[in-house]
Image (cartoon, rainbow, N blue to C red):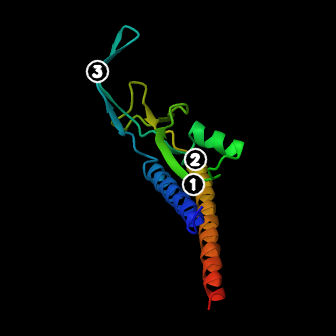
């Protein structure tokens, strides 16, 4: 383990939380976007579905340990070297397909169906704010860890004088 290991771990977390905040801000910006993705003609259950616009789908960030290979975990558990905690990485940005779109009655909207309902994005601003606060707190905690590591290194350098 080198001297800058804790700073590398912290910087990976800062990068991941910053991306998480970017995705949350994108979700908030598209809270009223009814034309998020254009779906082409396709056959579903033997029926032809015509091309149509789908509302914006909420996106989330999946985080994973940076080095989560079986060998590294086994070596760490066996005490044969390896380090615990090499940081975090963004494994993927996925769309939320489990939460259904909200239906709003607005017959004047050009995207309304024949009954006057419009599919709205599955973005809940309250949930996004909770996620944003969580990401912000995690970011602040990692900045504190980074500053503490830096202060320890500076004090270590003063010992050598």
Label 1 crowd bin: few (<14), some (14–19), many (20+), radius 10 Å = some
- Residue 87's tag is 1
Residue that extends furthest to the right in the rendered view of this protein: 78
Q: What distance separates the C-alpha of mark 3 from that of mark 2?
A: 40 Å
Query: Which label is found at residue 79?
Result: none
x and y percent of residue 141 in the render?
Answer: 64, 65
Disc 2 target residue: 65
On the image, the x and y values in percent for residue 112 come to 38, 32
* Residue at 65% from the left image edge and 77% from the top image edge: 152
CB contact under 8 Å: marks 1 and 3: no
- Distance from the alpha carbon under mark 1 to that under mark 2: 6 Å
* Disc 3: CA contacts within 10 A as few (<14), some (14-19) or many (>=20): few
Kindly identify the residue that appears in the image at 57 percent across and 60 percent down. Answer: 9
Write down the quadrant of residue 158 in the picture: bottom right
**For the residues bearing labels 1 and 2, Cβ distance under 8 angstroms:** yes
121 on left or right of 158: left
Q: Given the current orientation, which residue lies at the most extreme bottom position?
A: 161
Which residue corresponds to mark 3?
41
Q: Residues within 10 Å of mark 2 (few under 14, many from 20)?
A: few
Q: Secondary structure at mark 3?
A: loop
Who comes first in sequence, dot 3 or dot 2? Answer: 3
Report the quarter where the C terminus lies: bottom right
Q: Is residue 4 above or below residue 15?
A: below
């Amino acid at each position: 383990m080198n001297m800058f290991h804790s700073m590398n771990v912290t910087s990976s977390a800062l990068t991941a939380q910053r991306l998480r905040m970017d995705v949350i801000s994108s979700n908030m910006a598209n809270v009223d976007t009814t034309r998020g993705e254009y779906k082409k003609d396709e056959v579903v259950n033997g029926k032809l579905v015509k091309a149509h616009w789908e509302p914006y789908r909420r996106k989330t960030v999946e985080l994973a340990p940076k080095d989560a290979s079986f060998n590294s975990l086994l070596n760490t558990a066996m005490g044969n070297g390896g380090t615990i905690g090499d940081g975090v990485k963004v494994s993927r940005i996925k769309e939320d397909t489990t939460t259904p779109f909200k239906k709003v009655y607005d017959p004047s909207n050009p995207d309304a169906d024949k009954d006057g309902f419009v599919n709205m994005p599955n973005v809940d601003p309250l949930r996004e704010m909770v996620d944003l606060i969580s990401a912000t707190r995690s970011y602040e905690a990692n900045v504190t860890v980074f500053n503490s590591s830096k202060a320890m290194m500076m004090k270590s350098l003063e010992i050598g004088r």
